[in-house]
Image (tube, rainbow, N blue to C red):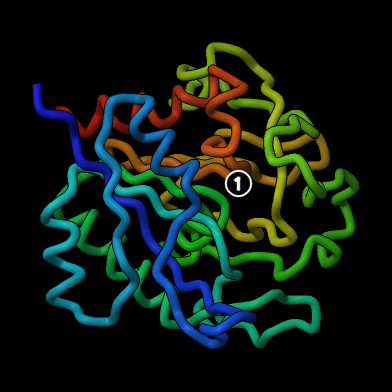
Amino acid sequence: MKRPIVGISGSIIVESAGGFEGYRRSYVNEDYCESVIKNGGIPYIIPMNSDDEVIKQQIENIDALILSGGHDVTPILYGQEPHQKIGQTLLERDKFDYKLIKYAKEKSIPILGICRGYQILNVYHGGTLYQDLSLNKDVYIKHNQVGNPTLLTHSVNLEKGTKLYDFFGKESIMVNSFHHQILDKVADEFVVSARSKDGVIEAFESKNYSFMIGVQWHPEMLHRVEESMNLLFKNLIENAKK
């Protein structure tokens, strides 16, 4: 059987030193590609661009979509001015991701959002974010670990009756954590499927769409050392075959 093609939303990195300082490169972290290959898919990096027809045809050529991590989402998209503690934003990437989501939904292909990808899914559907963890007084867990990307640093509780609970088959899992923003208002499109012990929403899934899941942690960084994290990619790819 032909392996499903999984598109991974690309970003831009700007060279800061050397002979090409200021030069823009299209990229995604390699772990996204390796996670897809390991679980039976063919990864395609989707280069960021602003051409509506190109983006539409990019989606036409894939069977599933992963929205990757990276920049903070531009807060004007959810009705807020930028807070002093916001990180780097890139509006052209937000617009690109919006179009990827739009055309992926029109094609009814499975969608997995990771970290920023999870946050942009929420904002696209009408949700909001805390621009920094410090703006929620109830947060006490360290959600932005330093160093080893494969280190499991805190637990999340999975909600019974959700796809995520069915994937993992237990009430609690350990995750890595690399974010300084969190969900505030959850879009009506979604049901919460995981929370950390301090109440931070760590995952959601669509109430209506066949496969649209977002997670705040980075399963792609864990796929080599924590076998259960492959379940997210395996199920994405299995749904792409249907």
Q: Within the image, what quadrant is residue 119 found in?
A: bottom right
- Label 1 residue SS: loop
Q: Name the residue nearer the viewer: 78 or 72.
A: 72
In this rendering, the answer to whether 87 lies above or below 104 is below
Q: Name the residue nearer the viewer: 161 or 64.
A: 64
The answer to whether residue 185 of the structure is visible from this angle is: yes
Return the x and y of residue 100 as percentages of the image width and height: 29, 63
The quarter in which the N terminus is drawn is top left
Residue drawn at the location 51% of the way across and 48% of the way down: 114
In this rendering, the answer to whether 191 lies above or below 70 is above
Q: Name the residue nearer the viewer: 186 or 124.
A: 124
Return the x and y of residue 12 as percentages of the image width and height: 46, 73
Residue drawn at the location 41% of the way across and 54% of the way down: 67
Return the x and y of residue 70 as percentages of the image width and height: 56, 62
Residue drawn at the location 45% of the way across and 57% of the way down: 28
Q: What residue is pinned by disc 1?
A: 216
